[in-house]
Amino acid sequence: MDARRHCLFTKEDIDRLGDDFNDMLVRSLTRSWAQDDEDVVDVLDVASRMRHQRNAELRSRLDELTKASEERSREVRKRDRVREANATIEELRALLEERNQTIDKLEGEATLWHDIAEEYASDLEEATAGTDKKNEKILAQLEGYRAEVAQKDEVIVDRENQVSKLTYDLKTAWGQVQQLSGELSHATGALAGFEAITHVPDCLSELLDLLEALYPGKVCVLPEAKKSAQDFDDRYVLDDELLILKSIPTTLWELYFGAKPSANIQQGYQAQTGFELALTEGSMTNKGSKYMKQRERTYHGQTISIAPHIKGHSGNPKDNFRLHYYADGERKLIVIGHCGAHLETAGSKKLS
């Protein structure tokens, strides 16, 4: 019904008619047209074209000014280089002139010095002609002096060797004197202690007092040791305790502080005395704070450990004799902290 009022264009028709046909359709349907960059269709386009033209003129003018400025800069630089070159040439001419004057002056001085040198050489030749024999005599004397100095040097070296040997001998003798002095001091103390004896010890506590009196420079007995000795008097075994106490200022002291301290105190002590020495307690006893507390003492304001101990040969475990000590390296003393019954250990309950 509407075929008379409408016109149908298929896709094939549009493709066949091309782009011009599309432009025609757009203008017919929208009552407008496609505008290119060069088209002027209204007032705004006129203003745009004027701005575009003005910008083009300004760019052209700017290019001209830039080119002129660069040209002027090149001319200025060229003139500056010319002026600099002229100034440099003038400076070089002045320097060359000054150098020529200096050369002339030096040539004159050189001539003068050459004449002086020739005159001096002539005088020197005349002066040295008569001194050659004197120089030979002086050289001979110098060689003699050198030989004497070499001989004196040998004597000095011999004297220095003798002094070194005497110094070494003196140091060795002084060491021996100091050692003998220490031994004399110990002997004096022992003699004083021996002279103070008015009673033959018949118990452990008295024997401990005697040891301290005889060896004040090697043994220190703490109050706790004296108390433990008194408590052990009724179980006193003379042979074991006497031999152990006797070994403290002799064998044990020498192992710690003698001329050749031992690297193995335990082995050395047992080899010389036959008694067993332990530097520590058993692992279970070491873990018990109660047991280790019994092995602590106060000495010169400090807490020390008397864990090292010597064991007696008693066959009864309850009556085992123990001597606990501390080795004071600073004062070179064996500090006896316990002398008596076996201290409590982790295995004490098993023994009881």
Image: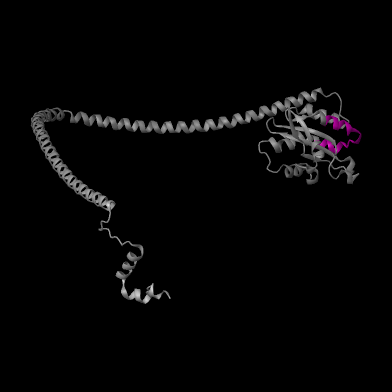
Q: Nearer the viewer, residue 70 or 18?
A: 18
Left or right, 229 with reference to 38 = right
The verdict on residue 215 being magenta is no
Q: Nearer the viewer, residue 253 or 102?
A: 102
The verdict on residue 232 being magenta is yes
User: Mostly what secondary structure, the magenta segment?
Assistant: helix
Q: Nearer the viewer, residue 102 or 176?
A: 102
User: Is residue 276 visible in the rendered structure shown here?
Assistant: no
Q: Residue at x 34, y 68 (%)?
A: 25
**Residue 33 location, x and y as percent?**
31, 62
Q: Residue at x 28, y 30 (%)?
A: 142
Number of numbered labels in the structure image: 0
Instruction: Examine the rendered structure and indicate whether residue 42 appears above or below residue 275.
Output: below
Left or right, 77 with reference to 145 = left
**Residue 349 location, x and y as percent?**
89, 44
Q: Residue at x 21, y 30 (%)?
A: 135
**Residue 279 location, x and y as percent?**
75, 41
Q: Quadrant of the C terminus?
A: top right
Q: Picture quarter containing residue 37?
A: bottom left
Q: Which residues are magenta?
A: 225-244
Protein image colouring: one colour
Instruction: Examine the rendered structure and indicate whether residue 71 appears above or below residue 306.
Output: below
Left or right, 115 with reference to 6 = left
Q: Picture quarter containing residue 146?
A: top left
**Residue 75 location, x and y as percent?**
13, 42
User: Is residue 248 visible in the rendered structure shown here?
Assistant: yes
Q: Quadrant of the N terminus?
A: bottom left
